[in-house]
Image (cartoon, rainbow, N blue to C red):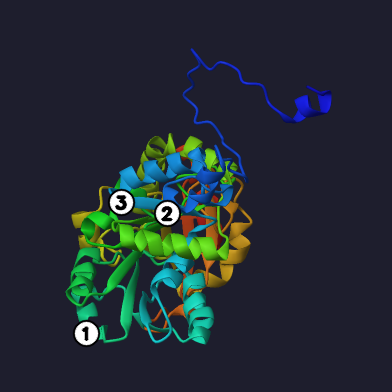
Amino acid sequence: MHDLTRCVQHPAVSQDGFKSLAVPTHRASTIVYDDPRDFARRAERGLDGYTYGLHGTPTTRILEAQLTALHGGARTMLVPSGQAAVAITMLAVLKPGDKVLIPDHVYPPVRSLCAGFLAERGIAHDVYDPLIGGGIADLIDASTRLIWLESPGSGTMEVQDVPAIARAAQARGVLTGCDNTWASPLLFKPLAHGVDVAVEALTKYVGGHSDLLLGSITVNDFGLRKALKDVLGVLGIGVSPDEAALALRGIETMGVRMAHSGRVAREFAERLQDAPAVARVLHPALPSCPGHEVFLRDFKGASAVFSLVIKPEFTARITPALGHLSLFAIGASWGGTHSLIAPMDVAADRTVRPWSPAEGLVRLSIGLEEPGELWEDLSRFLAALDAS
């Protein structure tokens, strides 16, 4: 064998006795076949078969299987981000003439997707009060194909009555999808409450270290899974095995990270209720949060993200007060090891459940820093808000 050939052809080595706790990272664009007949029949391998690197490798399949088991679903598909998970779901189930219902607290890019991209293609949307519960039945008409949920809303934290909405949708043959990023399947399992599609931004708690972008779509129906896979295929959307490997590493510690950060976040939320500049604390575990009763009924616990409503007389001080922080970083994402804070302007996005533009909203994500030092840092922010 020529040396040039030896450079290309890898030698076979024994793997007898080799066992690792780490999941191997299988990178591949080309999948090779045993013979021409095997190649010609590659379509017969089905949705779970390996045909081309874009459609998955053992690394991505392991993460998909792990998420499926956590959600109690039929299958999971990986996509490049949480927003991609929402968009792909809507593209897979909606066609011109259909309508989707979205909650007023929905992640803003989802509202933009509906009002722009989908509307331009003949797909309508209506916005509903996230606290409507079973009353959603009154909004369902002959064109309604999908009801979207996000519980709780990642800014204003309203907790939706997911089972009631799912029952109303099922009674009319309408699909439901739920953004479950705030809770993860450790705290809430949408499919177990009647939802058809659960999506998550794995960027957040699964990745857990603010160093990857990834999303997931988990379904309880194999026919729905095929529709989603077909859209991914024709659009040429896949994910990197390296991103999946980071998620597989992060998911191993997700339980302990969420338990710690969730406990500290709840303690902080309770203490912050007494801050002079704070009108109310929006944390699902507190009675002041809309949908609190539903949270107690359906969720196993709370995650690390909650919001502060700042009294109108203090809102002008939010920006300069943020400059007093040293441990909390200012950032829009969350779910990682670093604590984050982000001022939010939600009034312009609300059309059904109004939000007063005079009130300020600040979202917190509690990380893994020492809680006492985090509280000292947050206290400096609060003191700057309250400074006369």
| Residue under the image location 23 percent in, 54 percent down | 192
Residue 40 disc label: none
Give the Cα separation between the discs numbered 2 and 1.
32 Å
Using the rendered image of the protein, determine whether residue 59 is visible from the camera's viewpoint.
yes
Circles 2 and 3 in contact, beta carbons < 8 Å: no
> Whole-percent x and y of residue 16?
50, 14
Q: How far apart are marks 1 and 3 (CA)?
A: 31 Å
| Residue drawn at x 31%, y 82% as measured from the top left | 144
Q: Residue 313: x percent and y percent?
A: 49, 74
How far apart in space, not on screen, are marks 2 and 3 (Cα)? 29 Å
> Which residue type carries mark 1?
Asp
Picture coordinates of residue 169, whole percent (x, y): 23, 73
Dot 3 corresponds to which residue?
74
- Tell me if 43 is positioned left or right of 218 in this view: right
Task: Reply above or below: 40 against 27.
Answer: below
Up the image or down, 279 lies above or below 367; here it is below
Kindly check if marks 2 and 1 are in contact, taking CB atoms under 8 A apart as contact: no
Residue at image coords 53%, 86%: 120
The amino acid type, in three-letter code, at marker 3 is: Ala
Q: Quadrant of residue 66?
A: top left
* Quarter holding residue 159: bottom left
Q: Which mark is residue 138?
A: 1
